[in-house]
């Protein structure tokens, strides 16, 4: 194996509180923003109106609900440079990039695929293939570790060795 691709939420970024508590009354709008179907800036403006807070304050609130999977990151650091690492996040680019910067994830992950930026989201097989392409590996040379069984099954159908992270 030459590379490992991880699901971001629930594997790298662990949720501190209740995972599916909606932060915005319109869940569909959240999903559209994650998939890049609506402009992310428009979504952040709606959140500002809803919360009467700045985008930075809202991002800090969302960031505070997550914690880094330190044990996993330390393990990955010990496996470099023999192995390449990437992650896929169904999420907002501005928030994911802030988290990645705060946690210095660029030191560990060569590839960071964010759905809102790519206008492509899991479970679409194309997002897994995009991660492989950017890592410079074939799916058969790759492991996928995800938190949802349907994502793992899709990666497996593409030829990746795949595991559910628990």
Image: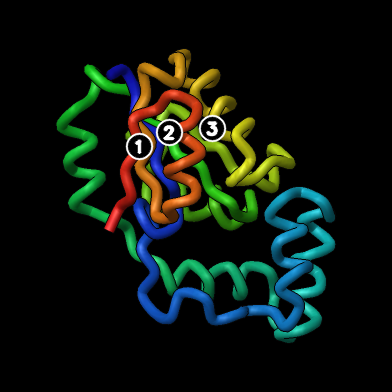
Please tell me which residue is depicted at 56% across the width and 26% down the height of the picture. Answer: 129
- Sequence-wise first label, 1 or 3: 3
- In the figure, is residue 11 to the left or right of 65? left
Left or right for 150, reference 94: left
Q: Which of 65/144 is in front?
A: 144
Label 1: how many residues lie within 10 Å, few (<14), some (14-19) or many (20+)? Answer: many
Front-lying residue, 146 or 58: 146
Q: Which residue is mark 3?
A: 128
Which quarter of the figure has residue 45?
A: bottom right
Could one spot residue 16 in this view of the protein? yes
Q: Is residue 107 left or right of residue 46?
A: left
The reply to whether the C-beta atoms of the residues labelled 1 and 3 are less than 8 Å apart is no
Residue 53 occupies which quadrant of the picture? bottom right
Q: Secondary structure at mark 2?
A: helix
Q: Are marks 1 and 2 in contact (CB under 8 Å)?
A: yes
- Residue 91: horizontal and vertical position, in percent? 60, 54
Label 1 and label 2: CA atoms lie apart by 6 Å
The label shown at residue 162 is 1
CA–CA distance in space, label 1 to label 3: 12 Å
- The percent coordinates of residue 44 (x first, y second) are 75, 66
Front one among 25 and 62: 25
């Amino acid at each position: 194996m030459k590379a490992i691709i991880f699901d971001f939420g629930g594997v790298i970024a662990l949720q501190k509180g209740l995972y599916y508590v909606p932060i915005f009354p319109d869940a569909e709008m959240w999903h559209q923003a994650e998939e890049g179907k609506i402009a992310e800036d428009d979504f952040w403006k709606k959140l500002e109106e809803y919360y009467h807070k700045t985008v930075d304050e809202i991002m800090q609130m969302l960031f505070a609900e997550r914690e880094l999977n330190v044990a996993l990151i330390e393990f990955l650091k010990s496996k470099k440079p023999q192995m390449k690492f990437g992650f896929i996040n169904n999420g907002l680019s501005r928030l994911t990039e802030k988290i990645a910067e705060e946690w210095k994830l660029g030191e560990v992950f060569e590839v960071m695929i964010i759905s809102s930026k790519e206008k492509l989201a899991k479970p679409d097989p194309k997002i897994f293939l995009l991660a492989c392409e950017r890592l410079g590996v074939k799916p058969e040379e790759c492991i996928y570790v995800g938190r949802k069984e349907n994502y793992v099954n899709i990666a497996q159908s593409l030829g990746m060795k795949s595991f559910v992270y628990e």
